[in-house]
Image: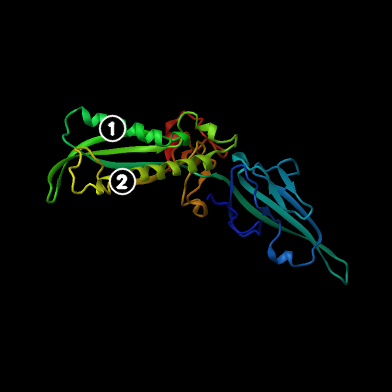
């Protein structure tokens, strides 16, 4: 179940230093240009001015919704909308005896970041016994296994990538020296035609992440069934090549789309999110870290426009 990031409630009261994370193409929570203290008081001649990330005064349009009481909602949030949102709240105090008026101004800052879920893939490893580390049968088993796994998840638009194996001699107590194939591969949700599973949605990571999780479960069940088959054959001669029980290992790998990255130090409230790269950084590929580039002044950069390599370095 994907989380819905509303940090405090549907209505967000300003607190100093608050960072707000909005999932790509979702609406922001309601931002209120007032603190709790003033919300409980009578306000005379209130006025509200919202300034956006480009230091332009915000006005209502198809994406920006500002109410008469200063509440702001940004709809269909995307990368370039990230940044500092500032509201100036003005009101008057009136002395009853003299009718003397005084204008008071308060400023409230909201730092808003677009984010998206990371793309999941799974790194897996298994072991099979083999008669010898020499011979074509090892290659044959490797190719057949890959085909079986690809067929298991073809309807999920997932496939095996980066498969490899090595043969090792393993000494096992009371069994002596045997040969085993150490097989590794990655299960990836971007098989050819994967976009067809998205049902025309703008962002597809919810679907691809669900699909690759199902693929992971199917593969785990496949190897569990292999173990069960041979566990019922204890008194029989095992084939020379068979799955080694309890050898299945799996680890989830996260990646971020270009223009997004993870930074637990900067975004501790959204540490597992792929957060839009801030000005001065970029991400050109599916890495999980935004790289530095001093010539970038926008959010969500996917490339560094300078050719000066000295201006680029990893965070």
Q: Which residue is mark 1?
A: 142
Q: CA distance from mark 2 to mark 1?
A: 15 Å
Q: Earlier in the sequence, mark 2 or mark 1?
A: 1
Question: Which image quadrant is residue 177 in?
Answer: top left
- Residue density around tag 2, few if under 14, some if 14–19, many if 20 or more, within 10 Å: some
Which quarter shows the C terminus?
top left
SS label for mark 1: helix
One can see residue 43 in this view = yes
Q: Which residue is mark 2?
A: 248
The picture places residue 125, in percent across and down from the top left corner, at 31, 42
Q: Is residue 241 left or right of residue 174?
A: right
Where is residue 310? Give x, y as percent: 42, 34
- Front in this rendered view, residue 203 or 178: 178
Residue at coordinates 61% horizontally, 45% vertically from top-left? 83
Callout 1: few (<14), some (14-19), or many (20+) C-alpha neighbours within 10 Å? some
- Can residue 57 be seen in this snapshot? no
Image vertical order of residue 15 relative to residue 184, above or below: below
């Amino acid at each position: 179940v994907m989380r819905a990031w509303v940090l405090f409630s549907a209505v967000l009261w300003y607190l100093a230093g608050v960072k707000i994370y909005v999932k790509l193409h979702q609406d922001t929570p309601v931002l209120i240009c007032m603190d709790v203290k003033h919300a409980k008081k009578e306000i005379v001649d209130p006025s509200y001015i919202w300034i956006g990330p480009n230091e332009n005064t915000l006005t209502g349009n198809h994406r920006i919704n500002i109410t008469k009481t200063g509440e702001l909602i940004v709809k269909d949030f995307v990368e370039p909308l990230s940044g500092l949102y500032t509201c100036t709240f003005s009101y008057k105090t009136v002395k009853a005896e003299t009718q003397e008026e005084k204008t008071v101004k308060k400023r409230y800052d909201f730092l808003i970041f677009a984010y998206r879920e990371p793309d999941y893939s799974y790194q897996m490893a298994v072991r099979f016994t083999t008669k010898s580390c020499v011979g074509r049968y090892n290659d044959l088993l490797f190719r057949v296994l890959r085909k079986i796994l690809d067929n298991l998840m073809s309807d999920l638009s997932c496939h095996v990538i980066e498969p490899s194996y090595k043969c090792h001699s393993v000494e096992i107590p009371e069994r002596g020296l045997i040969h085993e194939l150490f097989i590794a591969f990655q299960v990836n949700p971007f098989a050819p035609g994967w976009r067809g599973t998205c049902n025309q949605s703008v962002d597809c990571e919810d679907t691809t992440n669900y699909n690759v999780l199902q693929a992971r479960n199917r593969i785990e069940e496949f190897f569990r069934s292999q173990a069960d088959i041979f566990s019922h054959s204890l008194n029989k001669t095992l084939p020379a090549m068979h799955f080694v029980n309890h050898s299945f290992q799996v680890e989830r790998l996260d990646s971020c789309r270009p223009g997004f990255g993870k930074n637990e130090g900067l975004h501790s409230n959204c540490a597992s999110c792929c957060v839009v790269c801030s000005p001065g950084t970029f991400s050109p590929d599916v890495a999980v870290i935004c790289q530095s580039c001093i010539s970038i002044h926008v959010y969500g950069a996917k490339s560094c426009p300078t050719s000066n390599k000295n201006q680029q370095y990893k965070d």
